[in-house]
Image: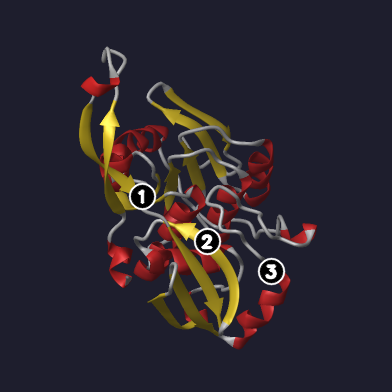
């Protein structure tokens, strides 16, 4: 079963009906790729914390990124050990973290139902819904054309989405316009957590580039980037008023509707974009 971690897609036969078909029996039957999703249980020091539905690729990246953006750890040094193992109906990520971080878990108790599109399921106190952020520290200056062109180039790097049409992507771009890394997942939050986890392990400086996301930009996406220290976030779809407020408060430059026709720069509090 552990092999499923390396098999993000499955195959299914489908009737390919098109309007020009005069009868269903004339439609072709073809094999099509389907995106896989699995439940992943996260345990910290043998205590169950959450169950998330994710695409079974880059699972360790997700586990590390999730741990950071949820406020459980401050960095890689807080993880003593991490293991991914198979269970009857999914997988378990078992982390051993330092005592100081483990004590925080009582402040972040969740009973997540594993919804891929939900960022607040199971939070039991309002003061945990939107935790305060430290100001982002970055001297980044980046040309608007670099951000725009990078988003146009991202599609070619969405390998799993080309097969299934079901996955979001998150990418990190440096100020020269080079896309340094891309991560994909059925959940937009998960894709960004995977990206952050990968960058942490590869020691990629978050303050010197831009995060691209192929989704809408709700406040959770801003919160994750600000927590990690990414100064600019560009989304292919819309943003929200709460995301904008959080971006302004943390000093993050927020862009939405980054598409072929252009992009909307909603805030750039530090004047990073020119």
**Residue plotted at (37% across, 46% down):** 175
Can residue 176 be seen here? The reply is no
Q: Secondary structure at mark 1?
A: strand
**Residue 238, position as x, y percentages in the image:** 55, 32
Which residue is more in the foreground, 143 or 132?
A: 132
Mark 1 surroundings: few (<14), some (14-19) or many (≥20) residues within 10 A: many
Question: Distance of mark 1 from mark 3, alpha carbons?
Answer: 33 Å
**Residue plotted at (60% across, 59% down):** 113
Q: Which residue is mark 2?
A: 52
Question: Distance of mark 2 from mark 1, alpha carbons?
Answer: 30 Å
Which residue is more in the foreground, 259 or 34?
A: 34
Tell me: 146 left or right of 101: left
**Residue plotted at (38% across, 49% down):** 171
**Residue 17, position as x, y percentages in the image:** 29, 24
Q: Quadrant of residue 33?
A: top left
Quarter containing the N terminus: bottom left
Question: Distance of mark 3 from mark 2, alpha carbons?
Answer: 15 Å
- The dot on residue 174 is 1
Which residue is more in the foreground, 147 or 78?
A: 78
Tell me: 95 left or right of 105: left
Does residue 7 sit above or below 164 in this rendering? below
- Of labels 2 and 1, earlier in sequence is 2
- Of labels 3 and 2, earlier in sequence is 2
Frontmost of labels 2 and 1 is: 2
Mark 2 surroundings: few (<14), some (14-19) or many (≥20) residues within 10 A: some
């Amino acid at each position: 079963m552990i092999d499923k971690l390396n098999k993000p897609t499955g195959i299914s036969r489908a009737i390919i009906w098109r309007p020009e078909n005069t009868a269903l029996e004339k439609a072709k039957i073809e094999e099509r790729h389907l995106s896989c999703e699995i439940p992943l249980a996260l345990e910290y020091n043998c205590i169950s914390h959450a169950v998330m539905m994710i695409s079974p690729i880059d699972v360790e990246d997700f586990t590390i990124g999730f741990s950071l953006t949820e406020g459980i750890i401050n960095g890689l040094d807080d993880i003593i050990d991490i293991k991914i193992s198979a269970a009857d109906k999914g997988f378990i990520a078992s982390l051993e973290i330092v005592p100081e971080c483990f004590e925080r878990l009582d402040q972040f108790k969740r009973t997540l139902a594993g919804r891929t599109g939900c960022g607040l399921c199971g939070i039991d106190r309002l003061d945990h819904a939107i935790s305060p952020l430290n100001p982002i520290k970055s001297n980044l200056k980046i040309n608007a054309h670099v951000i725009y062109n990078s988003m146009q180039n991202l599609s070619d790097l969405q390998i799993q989405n080309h097969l299934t049409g079901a996955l979001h992507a998150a990418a990190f771009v440096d100020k020269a316009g080079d896309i340094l890394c891309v991560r994909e997942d059925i959940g937009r939050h998960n894709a960004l957590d995977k990206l952050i986890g990968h960058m942490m392990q590869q020691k990629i400086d978050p303050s010197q580039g831009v995060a691209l996301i192929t989704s809408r930009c709700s406040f959770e996406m801003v919160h994750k980037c600000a927590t990690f220290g990414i100064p600019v976030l560009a989304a292919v779809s819309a943003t929200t008023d709460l995301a904008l407020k959080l971006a302004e408060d943390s000093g993050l430059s927020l862009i939405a509707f980054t598409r072929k026709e252009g992009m909307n720069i909603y805030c750039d509090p530090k004047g990073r974009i020119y």
